[in-house]
Image (cartoon, rainbow, N blue to C red):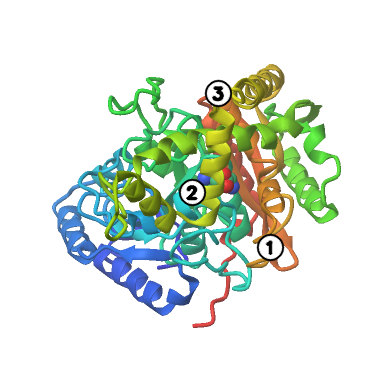
Amino acid sequence: MINRSLSQQLDDLSKGEYSSVELTQTYLDRIENHQSLNAYVSISKDVLEKARQADQLRAAGERKPLLGIPLAHKDIFCEAGVRTTAGSKMLDNFISPYDSTVVSLLRNAGALSLGKTNMDEFAMGSSNESSYFGAVKNPWQVDRVPGGSSGGSAAAVAARLCAAATGTDTGGSIRQPAAFCGITGIKPTYGRVSRWGMIAYASSLDQAGPLATTAEDCALLLSAMAGADEKDSTSSAVQVEDYSKFLSQDLKGKKIGLCVEYMEGLDPEMSRVIEEAIEVLSKLGAEFMDISLPTSPLAIPAYYIIAPAECSANLSRYDGVRFGYRCENPENLEDLYKRSRSESFGQEVKNRIMVGAFALSAGYYDAYYKKAQQIRRLIKNDFLEAFKSVDAILGPTTPGPAFKIGANADEPQAMYLQDIYTISANLAGLPAISLPAGFIEDLPAGIQLIGNYFDEATLLNLGHQFQAQTDWHKKAPELST
Ligand code: GLN
């Protein structure tokens, strides 16, 4: 059961090979046995009951697209009546009174909520080490990080503790953990998926998407998650496609750009992974050409002004009054604010609030925040130029494979550089997918394809065709128990 992709599980359920209750119980047992990975923060209490109901509905002829499939949700998505922590002590006891749009859309499509996955605190991080609930372990080598911030989701899918999970990506948080854990993840175009009920980090960059073993599964999930939502004014009215329909399209004549700035100075092992992927896609009829994204070296500095600026504003709502952690015996209102925040935010979150507040302050706004926004526009212009001649841009997802837990803990800059290939897509608002494409030192390596606005279909088509010729996505780590 557990080595079947989500799409295969749907087939199995409809043929009666096993029931949703059996599938759910299998995952619950595995989660229990592999608690040491620390991938989940909490397990849904009623998931078996929901699985029973799904089995009954199926027996009665109901055919919802994800009926009876247990999914994990990153603990950033609010779910009514369920603890939603965003990996922070601040929200350790927060029970959401409402559902995020992503959770309710997936539930409406028939999916079950297996539990909530661990993540970097407020999605700030590339290793999952900033979580209040402790680091997640990479199931391929448990002394390695799974990536972040959706590290719990990626580790859970890789370890077969669920067939698929939701994630969010502000600067790479779906794609980088997908690459580190040997699975597939897509960050959709900004506005493709509603952000309602998704705890905000940097609102102009945050976007939700699926993590699964295959592009086919991502297509299925994204079709269910995407769409306009009156509760999120940045969600787009562009028609949602049935992404599964485009998967088998021929790649003949598809034009793929290779960004010279990404390929220069790339680690030789990573270059080999890219070369091999080029060969596979060329055989399928794709044509490659060099393109340039000249402002891409400015992406990280711009991001680390814009994201902290937005986070400093978004996180101001955690004041110890309305919800979340409140300090003991405050002396006065100012003490309440100060101590509630300083006692419950972790160091990385505090650093970013300080940087963001500084960049937005009078006198510095023009020098930092405004400049960063101008760079953001130049980055977008580079992509607009490139997409005049190509359908997608291929490159690495990360500079190398998963690093050791603790390796970058004291070097924020080294940690930030992990996102060097992923951040531009967020700044420009473009969709991008990470696909498993090989191994480096027995650890998974991922390739990234960046697409044009609202052209998730092309990325999923390329991903599916690539996976029809390769078996990297079928590899699973051997777990000790
Ligand atoms: N690693 C990046 C950061 O720390 C991206 C995180 C994300 O995409 N949520 O900001």
| Closer to the camera in the image, 138 or 239 | 138
Taking the image as shown, residue 85 lies to the left or right of residue 294, namely: left
Q: Position of residue 144 (x, y in %)?
A: 63, 68
CA distance for labels 2 and 3: 27 Å
Q: On the image, numbered disc 3 is attached to which residue?
A: 362
| First in residue order: circle 1 vs circle 2 | 2
| First in residue order: circle 2 vs circle 3 | 2
At 62% from the left and 25% from the top, the residue drawn is 364
Indicate yes or no: mark 2 CB to ligand 1 under 8 Å.
yes
Taking the image as shown, residue 85 lies to the left or right of residue 434, namely: left
| First in residue order: circle 1 vs circle 3 | 3
Q: Nearer the viewer, mark 2 or mark 3?
A: 3
Q: Nearer the viewer, mark 1 or mark 3?
A: 3
Task: Name the kind of residue labelled 1 in the image.
Answer: Phe
Classify the position of ligand 1 by quadrant: top left, top right, bottom left or bottom right. top right
- Residue 403: image tag: 1
Q: Nearer the viewer, mark 1 or mark 2?
A: 2
Q: Determine crowd level at label 1: few under 14, some 14-19, many 20+ residues with C-alpha closer than 10 A.
A: many
Q: On the image, numbered disc 2 is attached to which residue?
A: 123
CA distance for labels 1 and 2: 19 Å
Q: Position of residue 151 (x, y in %)?
A: 52, 57
CA distance for labels 1 and 3: 39 Å
Task: Name the kind of residue labelled 3 in the image.
Answer: Ala
Q: From this view, report whether residue 357 is shown above or below residue 75.
A: above
Helix, strand or loop status at disc 2: helix
Q: From this view, report whether residue 253 is shown above or below residue 207.
A: above
Q: Are marks 1 and 2 in contact (CB under 8 Å)?
A: no
Residue reaching furthest front?
A: 331
Q: Determine crowd level at label 2: few under 14, some 14-19, many 20+ residues with C-alpha closer than 10 A.
A: many
